[in-house]
């Protein structure tokens, strides 16, 4: 038996070593997008044939008309008048389809310069992000990769645009990176809360009267600030709260610029 580390006892009979099975990339992860790009470059599309774009657009139609539960590879294939096998040449699973849709929707964000300076540009970008996220048919948790988000081409396009805005405004690379992340998390988080059943609406929070009744039933010394400002708290609309938060964010960015230091 060889013991110098060059051979394993299990391979003394001449059998080939077992090949390691690669763990599939998680749909939506950076590795998945990289592998997908390589496959797409090798694919030769046929005129009038299936394409990823057609599949995603059809899936979006199903989402908007019937909801997430109705979205399956089979339902997309049926609407396209083709077989499941044909779709599997372009997507490997429903999870991959959802990841493609999530990034496709982000491509609807218009990345425009206002010509009025960095603050107006960032405000326009944040409002545009909110508009698109509020109107997309996927629920907030769908298409979110455990391996990290923001790796699709349209999301990278957004990050690149935001980073350029902040760097041109005068932030350092580190400041621009953290500011971009903060902006995305603020807009995404506040908008996803708005889309949830517990989110604020145009008339404030649901169940405002119930909250007032709850406070009235508690000892008088409990929650004095909320008792004083409670009506304002429950009545504040989602749009007004977002605008206020955006103003605070932009003021914070302005305070980091060299001209204010």
Image (cartoon, rainbow, N blue to C red):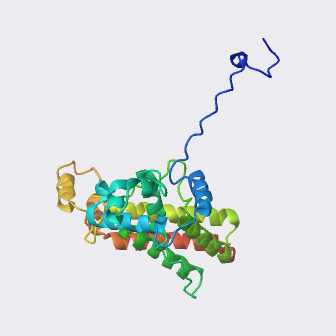
Q: For residue 72, say whether it is visible.
A: no
Seen as rendered, the residue at the extreme right is 4
Q: Assign the C terminus to one quadrant of the image.
A: bottom right
Q: Residue furthest bottom?
A: 115
Residue at image x 23%, y 62%? 206
- Residue 13 sits above or below residue 89 on the image: above
Q: On the image, which quarter does residue 211 sit in?
A: bottom left
Q: Residue at x 33, y 57 (%)?
A: 71
The percent coordinates of residue 179 (x first, y second) are 59, 65
Residue 209 visible at all: yes
Q: Position of residue 40 (x, y in %)?
A: 58, 61
174 w.r.t. 7: above or below: below
Q: Nearer the viewer, residue 130 or 248?
A: 130
Q: Is residue 5 left or right of residue 226?
A: right
Relative height, residue 89 to residue 236 (above, below): above
Task: Name the foreground residue: 161 vs 253.
Answer: 161
Tell me what residue is drawn at x 52 percent, y 69 percent. Answer: 46
Quadrant in the picture for the N terminus:
top right
Query: Which of the 4 quarters of the picture holds residue 151?
Result: bottom right
Q: Tell me where residue 55 sits by quadrant.
A: bottom left
Residue at horizontal 48 percent and vertical 74 percent from the top: 109
Residue 228 falls left or right of residue 25: left
Q: Position of residue 223 (x, y in %)?
A: 29, 53
């Amino acid at each position: 038996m060889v013991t110098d580390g060059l051979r394993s006892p299990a391979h003394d009979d001449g059998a080939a070593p077992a090949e390691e099975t690669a763990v599939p990339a998680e749909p939506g992860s950076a590795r998945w997008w990289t592998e997908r790009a390589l496959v797409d470059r090798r694919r030769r599309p046929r005129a009038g044939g299936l394409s990823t774009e057609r599949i995603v657009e059809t899936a979006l139609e199903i989402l908007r008309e019937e909801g997430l539960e109705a979205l399956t590879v089979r339902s997309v294939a049926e609407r396209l008048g083709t077989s499941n096998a044909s779709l599997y040449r372009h997507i490997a699973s429903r999870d991959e389809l959802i990841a493609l849709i999530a990034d496709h929707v982000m491509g609807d964000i218009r990345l425009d310069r206002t010509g009025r300076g960095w603050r107006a540009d960032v405000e326009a970008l944040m409002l545009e992000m909110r508009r698109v996220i509020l109107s997309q048919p996927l629920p907030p948790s769908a298409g979110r990769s455990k391996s990290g988000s923001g790796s699709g081409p349209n999301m990278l396009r957004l990050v690149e645009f935001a980073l350029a805005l902040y760097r041109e405004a005068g932030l350092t690379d580190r400041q621009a990176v953290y500011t971009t992340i903060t902006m995305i998390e603020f807009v995404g988080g506040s908008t996803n809360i708005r889309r949830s059943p517990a989110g604020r609406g145009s008339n404030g929070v649901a169940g405002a009267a119930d909250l007032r009744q709850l406070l009235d039933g508690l000892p008088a010394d409990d929650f004095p600030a909320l008792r004083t400002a409670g009506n304002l708290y429950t009545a504040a609309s989602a749009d007004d709260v977002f605008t206020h938060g955006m103003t605070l964010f932009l003021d914070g960015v302005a305070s980091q610029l060299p001209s204010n230091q």
